[in-house]
Amino acid sequence: MTPESTSLKKQFGKRLQQVRSSRGLTQEELAEKVGLTIESISNIERGIHGPSFDNLEKITTALNVPAKSLFEFE
Amino acid sequence: MTPESTSLKKQFGKRLQQVRSSRGLTQEELAEKVGLTIESISNIERGIHGPSFDNLEKITTALNVPAKSLFEFE
DNA sequence: GGTTTAACGAAGCTAAACTTCGGGTTGTAA
DNA sequence: TTACAACCCGAAGTTTAGCTTCGTTAAACC
């Protein structure tokens, strides 16, 4: 089981949490900006599920980052 | 209406079509690799809708590119 | 002409995104 | 030691948007 085999959802969630924190936002604040519940943001950050494409776009505008940057993993 | 205001779906679809073509794949071939119908691939490339996160991951593996590269627009 | 590739609509289906409930954990500050 | 903030976590229900299945049209190439 290589570490690279982590699902895209998990990697995205981890990256989202990084960017959100770096912006000094709580899950609740991001949720309100995007128009989702805090639970849904939590689920996305934990990799339970990814956002829909429309919500992905809203997240990028809420965080003021290009979509690309949310897919930059290490 | 600035050109930049094009929806993420549209931008992603356009980029997907670029990458797929550059790989010398038809919509049908990509559809088979990903496990979707050709109509669905067509809809995604035309920006009718985006892929689910699971299918986004399958697309990246089918094209052998990082997810990030499908969000690199100009 | 015949074949391939892909655009395009409409209408239905279903999986996955999303919500709503409840409870648990950690940190910290009063 | 309590109170609050922020977040994790599971289960069960709802909704929506991703996906399919029909069918038509058209350009490109042989």
Image (tube, coloured by chain):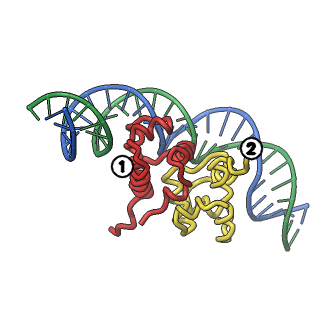
Chain colours: A red, B yellow, C blue, D green
Q: Is residue C23 above or below residue B62?
A: above
Side of C3 where B74 appears, left or right: left
| Circle 1 SS class | loop
Neighbor class of circle 1 (other Cα within 10 Å; few <14, some 14-19, many 20+) is some
Please tell me which residue lies in front, D27 or B16. Answer: B16
Q: Position of residue C27 (x, y in %)?
A: 21, 46
- Going by the numbered disc 2, the residue's amino acid type is Met
For the point 38% across and 37% down, which residue is it?
A39
> Looking at the picture, how far across and down is residue C1, in whole percent?
91, 61
For the N terminus of chain A, which image quadrant? bottom left
Q: Which residue is mark 1?
A: A46
Relative depth, front residue between B69 and A34 = A34
Label 2: state its secondary structure: loop
Label count reads: 2
Mark 2: few/some/many CA within 10 Å (<14, 14-19, 20+)? few
Relative to C27, is A12 on the left or the right? right
* Residue B38 appears in the rendering: no
Asked if residue B72 shows in the view, the reply is yes
The quarter of the rendered structure image containing the C terminus of chain A is: bottom left
Query: Which residue is pictured at 59% across the width and 61% down the height?
Result: B70
Identify whether C30 is placed above or below A20.
above
Counting from the top left corner in percent of width and height, residue A62 is at 52, 44
Q: Chain of mark 1?
A: A
Q: Which residue is mark 2?
A: B1
Tell me which corner region of the image, top left, top right, bottom left or bottom right, holds residue A29: top left
Letter of the chain that mark 2 sits on in the rendering: B
- Spatial CA distance of label 1 from label 2 is 36 Å
